[in-house]
Amino acid sequence: MKILITGICGFVGYSVAKQLRALSGDLKIVGIDNLIRPGSELNRANLKALDVDFYHGDIRNASDFDVLPAVDWVIDAAANPSVLAGVDGKTSGRQLMEHNLAGTIEILEYCRKHSAGFLLLSTSRVYGVEPLANIPVEPSGARFELNQAANPMVGLTKAGISEAFSTEPPLSLYGTSKRAAELLALEYGSAFDLPVWINRCGVLAGPGQFGKADQGIFSFWIHSHRARRPLKYIGFGGNGYQVRDFFSPDDLAHLIFQQIQNPDKQVPKILNLGGGRELSMSLAELTEWCDDRFGKHEVTHTEEIRPFDIPWVIMDSNKVLEYWGWHPSWSKEELLESIAQHAEANPNWLEVVT
């Protein structure tokens, strides 16, 4: 089986390629990346050891697909992953849509040409900003917890946010670009009889991540704490009680490996993936963990509320457990410790990747 991974030099693309190679030596892996993200050259240097055929190209350019060989599956890990993209002054809305939507169209046309399956790595940010912001929470210890006595919300379960949660706009420009890509993928799959899987991922985390405050928050926080860089709790009382769950891209790759081997399996096409309650933390809890690991470090705070900030997101992954038997294999402590060891071994990491 031959697989193309777009964005293969990014943290997720490279991690998935590495894990797929560990799962099977029989896979032929091809990768494409435009190398615009700082740090991506580091992963490019390691692709040869994985026996990956690398192509320097941009998914926004149709002609860059002309040189690629035919494959059986495309795993789309190429995207601008920031929820602030298009509104933060660093990228324009047009650039965001060219990356996350126009690029997806070119990939789908390539899939149509070669009758290849398509696997989209989507995001929890396809869920509506207003419903997410209005999830009923209350302080409990150093974190927010669901207020179980509040009126129920559609798609909000004791396990977290399910696939039934609202995807009505506004979502953020980033979230809208990914939701539109989901719909396009499903339409192409139906129109051209292509197998399609859509994995809505919560926060992915692990060693080697290109951590930023608006993207790889767990990696960013641990690296910044170890380096004694400034850290700040923003909004929600300035206490750092906001909660996210997280999981390893290694575990994502295990699901992908099953999906590409079972293209005709009659199960839902869209599935949530996350760490769940067991792999969730607030920023305040993450700071406590870092204080124990690296020594005390002061974190400042502001009660400013920014657009798209949300108090609590834990992904309900019960459906992917039911249909694929999937659950994270990394524990919270193992994943945090792996990032901490990477931070100690690479003290200048933030300067390299930002």
Image: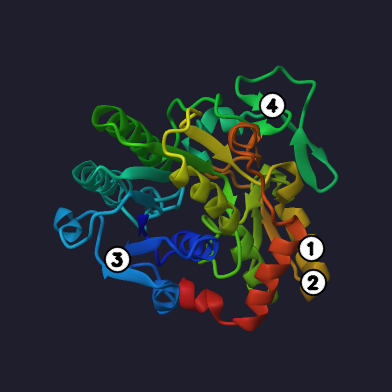
Sequence order check, earlier mark of 3 and 1:
3
Q: Is residue 160 above or below residue 260?
A: above
Q: Which residue is mark 3?
A: 34
> Secondary structure under badge 4?
strand
Q: Position of residue 16 (x, y in %)?
A: 49, 59
Query: Label 2: few (<14), some or many (≥20) within 10 Å?
Result: some
> Secondary structure under badge 3?
loop
Q: Which residue is mark 2?
A: 293
Most extreme residue toward the top is 151
Q: Which residue is mark 4?
A: 157
Q: Nearer the viewer, mark 3 or mark 1?
A: 3
Residue at x 64% of width, y 36% of height:
321
Q: Position of residue 205 (x, y in %)?
A: 60, 59
Q: CA distance from mark 2 to mark 3?
A: 36 Å
Q: Is residue 250 above or below residue 196?
A: below
Q: Is residue 178 above or below residue 283?
A: above
Most foreground residue, 255 or 301: 255
Most foreground residue, 321 or 266: 266
* Circles 2 and 1: CB atoms closer than 8 Å: yes
